[in-house]
Amino acid sequence: MNSTTTIPALGQSGQGLPDVRATLAAAFFGFSAGAILYGITIRQAFQYYTTCTEDSKWRKFVIAIVCLLDTIHLIFSMYLVYTLILQLVGYPFAGPTTLSLKALGSAQTFLILFVQGFYLSQIWKLSENLQFLTRRFSHAVHQRQFFVIFIAVFAIAVAVVFLSQLQKINSAFSFAAGFEYVVYLGFGATAVIDCAIAAAMCLMLNKGNGGLKTESIVESLIQYFIGSGLITSFAAILCITLYVAQPNTLLYLGMELSVTRLYANSVLAMFNARSRLRKRLNESVDLNHVPSFIHFRHPESTPQTISLLSPTASSPFSPGQETKYSKNSEWSESFRS
């Protein structure tokens, strides 16, 4: 048999025939980037289990599930790229790529849903603690809890639709017209949910006006949530863009092979940062760098502020006045626990 009759010409794409060069390049670079990010995932998981030994079993279970789903995704990514190369070079006994693609998409969906659910549970927990601290936030707390329920139901509904339609595909190179909207819905909803979670976290953190140490920690947390939300949202939007640009190739797959690593590393980075934040919370404050308004000054030059250290000040935990500590105490305790 002449091999030229079974191997598609590189750089050419006929009707219904994938662009071999673009497809192989996307699969290779996407898998390589995903493998590198998986190595970072394992490194961060090792760092967490060796340094955060006092964490609860639930937190350790969360990390274990994230690493397990990410490993499953890597295994099916490896098998998909392997069978894809064999098919594109015309090997007659290559296995089907649709099975590995379905398993790959399922693992990715479960991992993204699990990570988003974890972040939503943190928002719910913080809302309950704020409600326990003071009744003034009761209306806002109910709004946040409604937000968590709405986003969770929306994410689960999108995941169910995506998984049900994913099992109906019969080709990795060209999806049916009925499945294309599912691609847009899945990645588009992922980007919207990630942005909504990041915005909710930042708004809740920004409402607190803590002390010298707490303010710097809150700023670090806000920067983290904004960065992680933007990165994962950008990755989802890029998958849609690549699919719309060249639907007959697997360019979108190159990005999809790395998306789950971004979610896994975002959770692991947050857990590993807790130890550093705890150290910053437990550090003693150097009085030489404390703002001068709490030093002894002449009464006439003293600004019109009430110090909690003043004997005439009301109790910092009295119901008559809201204190700065009450808003951020939960975050302080969460990073110490």
Image (cartoon, helix red, strand yellow):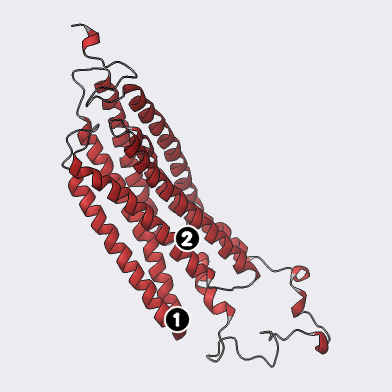
Q: Which circle's residue, 2 or 1, is located before the other in the chain?
A: 2
Crowding around mark 2 (Cα neighbors within 10 Å: few <14, some 14 to 19, many 20+) is few
Q: Residue at x 57, y 61 (%)?
A: 277
Percent x, y for residue 159? 25, 53
Whether tag 2 and tag 1 are in contact, CB under 8 A, the answer is no
Task: Give me the residue at 35% from left, 36% from top.
Answer: 245
Classify residue 151 by image quadrant.
bottom left
Identify residue type, mark 2: Glu
Say which amino acid is labelled 1.
Phe
x then y, percent, for residue 186: 29, 49
Determine the residue located farthest toward the right in the rendered image: 298
Q: Nearer the viewer, residue 15 or 204?
A: 15
| Residue 33 located left or right of residue 70 | right
Location of residue 18 with respect to 319 vertically, above or below:
above
Q: Is residue 70 left or right of residue 272?
A: left
Q: Which residue is mark 1?
A: 137
In this rendering, is residue 212 above or below 24? below
